Amino acid sequence: MSLLELRGVCKTYVDAQGGQALLADRLDLLVPGGRIVAILGPSGSGKSTLLKMVAGLEPPDAGSIYFAGQDLAAVPPERRGFALMFQDFALFPHLDVLDNVAFGLVEQGLRRAVARERALQMLAVFGLHSHARQKVWRLSGGEQQRVALARALITQPRLLLLDEPFSALDAELRTRLRDEFSQRIAATGITTVLVTHDEAEARAMAQQGFRLLQGRLLPLW
């Protein structure tokens, strides 16, 4: 059964020469529940824009996006229950590690003390308990990425959207983290869409893969 479904999604943008360029051309996608699906493509192919449309940060020009059978057109981003992880981690520099992870729970209305207790438990899972009161900018790139994933998973999102999550890291750390992330995401059973330009990374993490080419998704495996 498909949990996320894109039907006939279209999206254009104005390129550097002022012309219209296609990012999505009557694009269809079915993502089964509990699976990691990868979307491959070079920079500028529209991968990140596709995630933003699913997240509700950008509207499609045409077509529909459904989740669990619900048309998301009228559902604002904050009510979709999705988590989006960016390639630059997008952590809050003015908050320490603990409050970065607790942030989503506080936004959901949980009391700060309870949110922090749950955040401490999540940090322990990621081996970051001792860093709880550090500022995030003092952490290494790998540690910051673990904090970003902990922050995403703690809210138990209905869908996890990963936008080039390891591109800012060196090759050795990237390989180590992709394996760790795959295991942690699989353990939660959260449906995930990963966009990346790295086919080895996609094949290591995802059960299904597509290439975004000239606005269409071509199945790879």
Image (cartoon, helix red, strand yellow):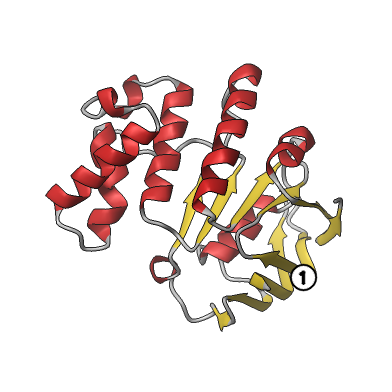
Q: Is residue 186 above or below residue 197?
A: below
| Residue at the extreme front of the image, as rendered | 187
Q: Secondary structure at mark 1?
A: strand
At a point 32% along the width and 35% down the height, the residue shown is: 123
Relative to 137, 43 lies left or right: right
Which residue type carries mark 1?
Answer: Asp
At a point 58% along the width and 58% down the height, the residue shown is: 191
Q: Which residue corresponds to mark 1?
A: 28
Give the percent coordinates (x, y) of residue 39.
Answer: 73, 51
Q: Would residue 90 be visible to someone looking at this image?
A: no
Give the percent coordinates (x, y) of residue 37.
Answer: 69, 53
Relative to 29, 182 lies left or right: left
Q: How many marks?
A: 1
In the rendered image, which quarter contains the N terminus?
A: bottom right
Give the percent coordinates (x, y) of residue 83.
Answer: 46, 55
Relative to 125, 21 lies left or right: right
Q: Would residue 117 be visible to someone looking at this image?
A: yes
Q: Is residue 219 above or below residue 8?
A: above
